[in-house]
Image: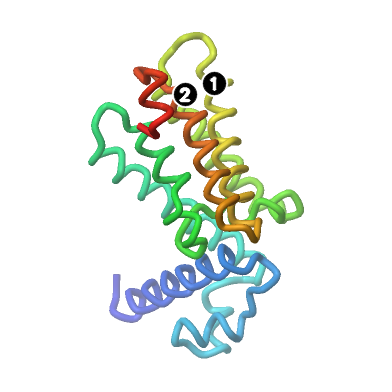
Amino acid sequence: MGHSQADKAQSHDRILAVAARQIREQGFDAVSVADLMRQAGLTHGGFYSHFASRDKLIAEAMEWALAAGERRSAKAARRADKRSLQTMIKAYLSQAHRDAPGSGCAIAALAGELGHAGPDVRDILTKYLRRSFEGIASELGDNGDGWQRALSTMSTMVGALALARAVSDRQLSDEILEAARRALIALTPGTDETAARKGG
């Protein structure tokens, strides 16, 4: 890769990183090309040398955000013991994750908007969710209902995080996270009821 191509690739990645944070913090509609390029340290006029349209930017930024989430999950799983699914549930349904939407799960951050997103974004989301469901089902083991349990687990995590971020009462928000965390951990393999009640 030549010097100018390498610079362009770095600039492209910088734009995507900023856009991915913006859509998670403020939603798709809040992304302004001018503001985005300013935050990325680039000129407004250079935008179209990277993206054919704002819609293409949004789709790529969504893919970037989801890929970043996958990398974090994979890293946590490598560090964890055999209870990696429990580790993932605890990390996902934590106060730290709730309080950092700009670097957290894009699905929970954009839960109210994804159903109205363009086809590119929805295709990217569908592929990501299928991989996530398959990964969770693998962790749950083959008891004949792994796929259904994976759908339920992921849906509960995303819904609980979205609700915990939406309410104005901090204590209620904490309770939502804790209730979902306990319920899901109690259903993972190798968890006894006492450990589930204690959160692991």
Residue 25 image position (x, y, % from top left):
57, 67
Residue 131 image position (x, y, % from top left):
49, 35
Q: Which amino acid lies under the numbered mark 1 shown in the image of this protein?
A: Trp
Q: Quadrant of the C terminus?
A: top left
- Report which quarter residue 116 is drawn in: bottom right
Q: Is label 2 in a helix, a strand or a loop?
A: helix
Q: Which of 169 and 114 is in front in this view?
A: 169
Task: State how the image is colored.
Answer: rainbow
Q: Say which residue label 2 marks.
A: 137
Relative vertical location of residue 34 with respect to residue 146 in this rendering, above or below: below
Residue 167 vs residue 20: left or right?
right
Residue 45 is labelled as none
Alpha carbons under labels 2 and 1: distance apart? 5 Å
Relative vertical location of residue 70 with respect to residue 48 in this rendering, above or below: above
- Disc 2 and disc 1 in contact, CB within 8 angstroms: yes
Please name the residue shown 49% across and 29% down the image: 184
Please name the residue shown 60% across and 36% down the image: 155
Residue that protrudes farthest toward the top in the picture: 144
Please name the residue shown 59% across and 66% down the image: 23
Q: In which quarter of the image is the N terminus?
A: bottom left
Please name the residue shown 38% across and 22% down the image: 194
Residue 162 image position (x, y, % from top left):
61, 50
Q: Which amino acid lies under the numbered mark 2 shown in the image of this protein?
A: Ala
Q: Say which residue label 1 marks.
A: 147
Crowd around label 1: few <14 · some 14–19 · many ≥20 (10 Å): some
Residue 170 image position (x, y, % from top left):
56, 57
- Report which quarter residue 192 is drawn in: top left
Residue 187 vs residue 2: left or right?
right
Q: Which of 86 and 105 is in front in this view?
A: 86
Crowd around label 2: few <14 · some 14–19 · many ≥20 (10 Å): many
